[in-house]
Image (spheres, grey):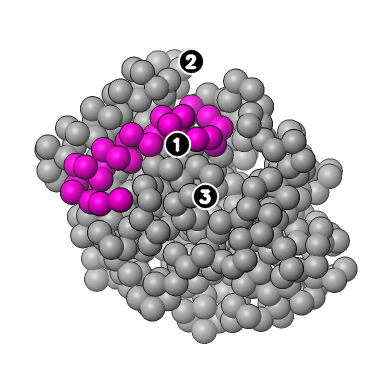
Amino acid sequence: MATKANEIVQKAVDTAIEEGGEIGVQVAAYLDGELAVDVCGGVADDTTGRQVDGETAFPVFSVIKAVTATALHIQAEKGLVDYHAPVAQYWPEFGKHGKDKGTVYDALTHRIGVPLMPVSVTPDLMCDWDWMVDQLAEMHPLFEPGTKSGYMAYTFGWVVGEVVRRTDPKERPFAVFIQEEICQPLGIDSLWAGIPADVNPRVARLIDMPAARAGMAPDSLMPRAMPPQVATIQEVFGRPDVRQACIPGAQGIMNARSGARFFAMLANGGELDGVRLLSEDRVRTFNVPRPPSDWDPVHGVPHKGTIGGFHVPGSPGMWPAGTNPRVFGHNAAGGTVGWADPDARLGVMITHNRMFPHGAREDNPLFPIGEAVREALGVRG
């Protein structure tokens, strides 16, 4: 690992903490399959003074969608899932109330019509996989599947994850599938959709946004897609039961090293250290924008996802990933972001615990950190 590269990125992290309002930050980057940046700084828990180190685990919210989408692509790679088949082919109960023609592709691209959470959801019920998938199966679609986009802030994980679970010959819980099919083969030791109980002391404490839903479009459906009673706040996502539950659209927990290693696999065309999870041809499609870029009633902006279930530069919150249109990854509520740059064979993860709203590039305190990573490693974009 290059000492000079770490020095450049460490300076950016320190500036983000001292001048940008950040509390605790980790940054890791893999270049050509090797860990090239690994730095951190600040406080993991402002109530105890616990410092961030490389082993600190951070809630990463929607970044876990990239892992969830990859799990589905693994099933497609094995011939167990057809992107163009109806979700109901694999999960018959889902086909109620006009959802029968909604395809796996529609689910991956947030066009299947179920972006809203059940009205009666609570943190306890959100932790119950069977309750959530039963509720989604019974739900009437917000629009005809395949005709519009509606960002599945939370529901993406259960819809995609249930397709994976239903097509898994071993019938594993989705959290186990992620560990056995993605993390263990790649040597990733600190990435979860539902942590083991003994990891809880490692998890950073969130610093909530000062103003709930700041900057949201007035007519946005986000308050129904992410209801206040299960909001992305410490009171909810700091609960041990929520941290330990598999909520794979919104509740990932990882450290930056593990996140960067995952994105490095994608940046290297589906392979890392001789372990291939996906074909190069399949991964090559992951940065292809999903047409058309129609208005998303949840985000209140045009949808800018890809056909593979990822986000690209220009999507809300993706500013730290730069401007290269071939980059793909996922950002999250509160600013956390990870990405793969296939041109540079670069995988990056930035984790932090101070929640801030998506906004302009100049207002994103993690953008200079992304710039520093590219400078340190000689990467354009």
The amino acid type found where label 2 is placed reads Thr
Residue type, label 3: Ser
Determine the secondary structure under disc 1: helix
Quarter of the view holding residue 291:
bottom right
Specify the amino acid type for callout 1: Arg
The image shows residue 146 at horizontal and vertical percentages of: 72, 70
Query: Circle 2 sits in a helix, a strand or a loop, which is it?
Result: loop
Identify the residue under disc 1.
Answer: 361
Position of residue 27 measured from the top left corner of the image (x, y, whole percent) = 32, 39
Res 315 label = 3
Cβ–Cβ below 8 Å for labels 3 and 1?
Answer: no
Residue range of the region highlighted in magenta in the rendering: 354-381
Mark 3 crowdedness (10 Å alpha carbons): few <14, some 14-19, many ≥20? some
- Residue 36 position, x and y percent, is 20, 47
- Secondary element type, mark 3: loop
Q: Residue at x 25, y 51 (%)?
A: 380
Residue 362, can we see it? yes
Q: CA distance from mark 2 to mark 1?
A: 30 Å
- From the viewer's side, name the closer residue of 82 and 75: 82
The nearer-to-camera label among 2 and 1 is 1
Q: Residue at x 50, y 55 (%)?
A: 311
In the figure, residue 238 lies in which quadrant? top right
- Which residue of the protein is positioned furthest toward the bottom in this rendering? 79
Does residue 371 belong to the magenta stretch? Answer: yes
Q: CA distance from mark 3 to mark 1?
A: 11 Å
Question: Residue 280 or 121: which is nearer the viewer?
Answer: 280
Residue at which label 2 appears: 47
